[in-house]
Amino acid sequence: MTTTVKPKIQVPEKKKESASRGSVYQSNQLNLWYDTNHALKNIDLDIKENEVTAIIGPSGCGKSTYIKTLNRMTETIPSVKTSGEIIYRGKNILEKGYKFEELRTKVGMVFQKPNPFPKSIYENIAYGPRIHGIKNKKILDQIVEKSLRGAAIWDEVKDRLNENAYSLSGGQQQRICIARCLAIEPDVILMDEPTSALDPISTLKVEELVQELKKEYSIIIVTHNMQQAARISDKTAFFLNGEVIEFDETDKIFSNPSDKRTEDYISGRFG
Amino acid sequence: MNYIDHESVAKKTNSRLLKNKVLKSIFLAATMFGLIVLAILLYRIVTQGSEYLSLEFFTSFASRIPENSGIKAAILGSIYLMLVVAPISMFLGVGTAVYLEEYAKKNKLTNFIRINISNLAGVPSVVFGLLGLTIFARFFGLGISILAAGLTMSLLILPIIIVAAQEAIRSVPKELRDASYAMGATKWQTILRIVLPAAIPGILTGSILALSRAIGETAPLVVLGIPTILMFTPDSILSTFTALPMQIFDWTKRPQVAFHDVAAAGIIVLMTLLIIMNSIAVFIRNKYQKRY
């Protein structure tokens, strides 16, 4: 079969200035095993700051696993082994003795399913600052307002801060989770399919939010939805069977991919 | 070609429906058996004991004369016993459950411990009495005291509390822990602020049910040699005491028939106490049960 099928996904115009940006994460020859299952194979990725990096690929390709190694959340699963290195701001986070609690105060994470704590909205946002030792009520109030504004949900919840976060809709809960993550003033935000459990309108709100957030934060987002990757990301990495097949500017990936498999995937031939 | 012959199915329908009806009544009978026995028991106890149930019954000590007998020493003893058992067994039980569920690596050793905790729950209470007598009363020299009995009872109900707490902790969704860890919280911060608050209704329910077992348990107290006629109330956890089930046990052993009615009055008090404790457990479970 010839490769004349043109990918149909439109990529909006984006400014290109990434050459001048520094790196937040560099993975060098990263390998990861679940028992004997080799889930990540020799991953080399260089992720720049203040960009949205999308990770796409079919189910089971290792994209979620990869994002979870970036804040060492894979370690909550027993029997995980890694080799290689992940350099975050000049330090190898996989090194023995690296305090991952410290890393996670700088790297926030938003999960696939909205997972607010069964507490009030206020307490959900104040959770991060509290565990890092902030007790002053005034400062906490300010952090809560700033974070909720940052996640574009302040106007919706400002009058009901003491209500349980579970009383909100799924889309609002996810933005509460984003606000909760902003409250620890992170440097990087990792998003693991943040909109897969949301309806289209909530998805749109989260996507707009991501565009807003990238001015201040570096964002790495795993997504199942290729249109989403095309809409919101600056760079896209395509994963397949635990390997990075292609990593490039998003418009290049979606208009002129250099690998046949990338083209097959984004034009919908598999995945 | 049809595989189902609808005519023969129709023929068999009646016998299938009959079978269903017969089994339904057998299961109903099984349910009623327990309920009826319980009702008869309650009726007999209430009719026998109610005439001795008065304010004096709660304010007088045991006596040689049935009319003057009371449960002051026994009820105070049981309360003191609970004051020792509740904190010790809950601290040890919840601590063990937190360690096994949150900290311990999942390997053969922890698996072995887990299985044996469940086995421990099946050990007869007399055996715990012997253990308490040997270790707490004799070896540590605590004698026949509230502390010795309290420690023995704590050991007895510890497995029940551990298993209940483990289940409560396990039912806290992993997503909540992940959210906490992902913000840089340590294990302990996550346990204290996320896991325990969500697990506490389950832990309390299990603990109260375990405590109500301890309050009605007699065998370990018999083995420890707790006295039954006591004309004073305990003044410290090291003084001797008697407890409600011991007092009841003693009255039922007496030859005079009147004492059997006194025992029935004692049983009413003990059962009321148990029902109150169980109701509190049910109330907590229903009120604070959270769905995720």
Image (cartoon, grey):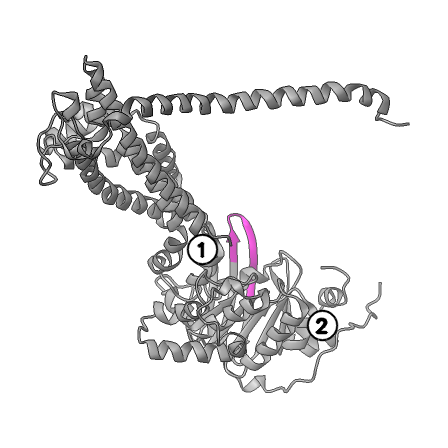
Front residue of A107/B51: it is B51
The reply to whether discs 2 and 1 touch (Cβ–Cβ < 8 Å) is: no
**Chain that bears disc 1:** A
> Considering only order in the chain, which callout, 1 or 2, is on the residue closer to the N terminus?
1
**A35 inside magenta stretch:** yes
* Label ID, residue A76: 1
Figure check: B196 above or below B73:
below
Is residue B200 part of the magenta span, yes or no? no
Evaluate whether residue B81 shows in this view.
yes
Please give the residue where the numbered disc 2 appears in the rendered image: A258
Residue B217 x/y as whole percent: 27, 29
Q: Identify the secondary structure beneath mark 2.
A: loop
Q: On the image, which quarter does residue B155 sit in?
A: top left
Q: In the image, what residue type sits under mark 1?
A: Thr
| Amino acid beneath label 2 | Ser
Left or right: A142 as drawn, with respect to A21: left
The mark tally for this picture is: 2
Q: CA distance from mark 2 to mark 1?
A: 36 Å
Give the letter of the chain under mark 2: A
Same-chain status of marks 2 and 1:
yes
Residue A140: percent from left, percent from top: 37, 76
- Residue at 44 percent of width and 57 percent of height: B177
Reply above or below: B32 against B174. Answer: above
Q: Position of residue B282 (x, y in %)?
A: 41, 42
Relative to residue A126, is residue B209 depicted above or below?
above
In the image, is residue B34 above or below residue A1? Answer: above
Q: Nearer the viewer, mark 2 or mark 1?
A: 1
Report if residue B5 is visible in the image: no
Magenta residues span: A32-43
Regarding mark 1 in the picture, which secondary structure is present there? helix
